[in-house]
Image (cartoon, rainbow, N blue to C red):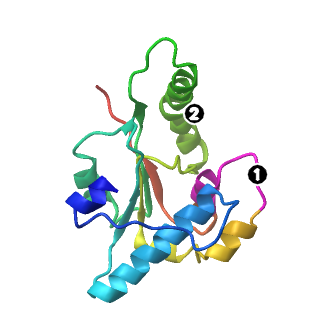
Amino acid sequence: MASRRSEARVIRVTVPHDGPTNKADCLNWIYHAIRRYEAAEGIAFQIFVMQDCEDVIHPLCYRLFNYLIPRKDMVQLPVLSLERRWREFTGGHYLDEFAQLHYKDLVVRELLDRSLPAAGVGVAFSRRALAGQSLTPTTARSSAPSRSPRDYDFGFRLKRLGMRQIFVKFEG
């Protein structure tokens, strides 16, 4: 709450019901809060970025999103987790998973069929991509849990709808 008091641009969004809830439910309520904000302010955002504070993306990524989004509906960046101490096994596993997914699997997947899961972090969507998904809080809450997270599925649904995706690779 301290960030909301010190920064007027931070808006708190809560789900209007008691749990249980899931990531999709929370993300859909955030999306609907954004839509209410747009209506109240008379603006329309063209890019929606999903990012976690514990993951690291390049500081110029937002310029890259601005450049690519008019031509692509989803832009996925490679993401690195912050370094972990040796005893932080869960975080270390997370780091290994992202390294495998973002530096091997996604590169091959994009080459083979141009289909990308949305990793839920380091990813930007066009307004068209979100509008094409018909996001509603009820469908998110009623969707049965699956083996792949909902944000991964979101990327696959964009492919089925014929929307353009890109995984941005860069050499360091």
In the foreground, 74 or 11: 11
Residue 75's mark? Answer: none
Which of 122/6 is in front?
6
Q: State the CA–CA distance, disc 1 to disc 2.
A: 20 Å
- Label 1 Cα crowd, 10 Å radius (few <14 / some 14-19 / many 20+): few
Task: Say above or below: 48 vs 43.
Answer: above
Lateral position of residue 26 relative to residue 44, left or right: right
Q: Nearer the viewer, residue 93 or 129?
A: 93
Write the start and end of the magenta stretch as one range: 144-157
Query: In percent of the image, x 53 and y 63: which residue is there?
Result: 27
Residue 73, percent from left and from top: 44, 64
Q: Residue at x 76, y 51 (%)?
A: 146
- x and y, in percent, of residue 92 in the image: 52, 21
Residue labelled with disc 2: 105
> What label does residue 146 carry, if any?
1
* 122 magenta-colored: no
The one of 46 and 19 positioned closer to us in this rendering: 19
Residue 37 image offset from top left, x and y in percent: 35, 80
Residue drawn at point x = 60 percent, y = 69 percent: 161
- For the residue carrying disc 2, how many other residues have a C-alpha within 10 Å: few (<14), some (14-19), or many (20+)? few
Q: Secondary structure at mark 2?
A: helix
Residue 129 in view, yes or no: no
Q: Position of residue 9 (x, y in %)?
A: 25, 66
* Residue 147 among those drawn in magenta: yes
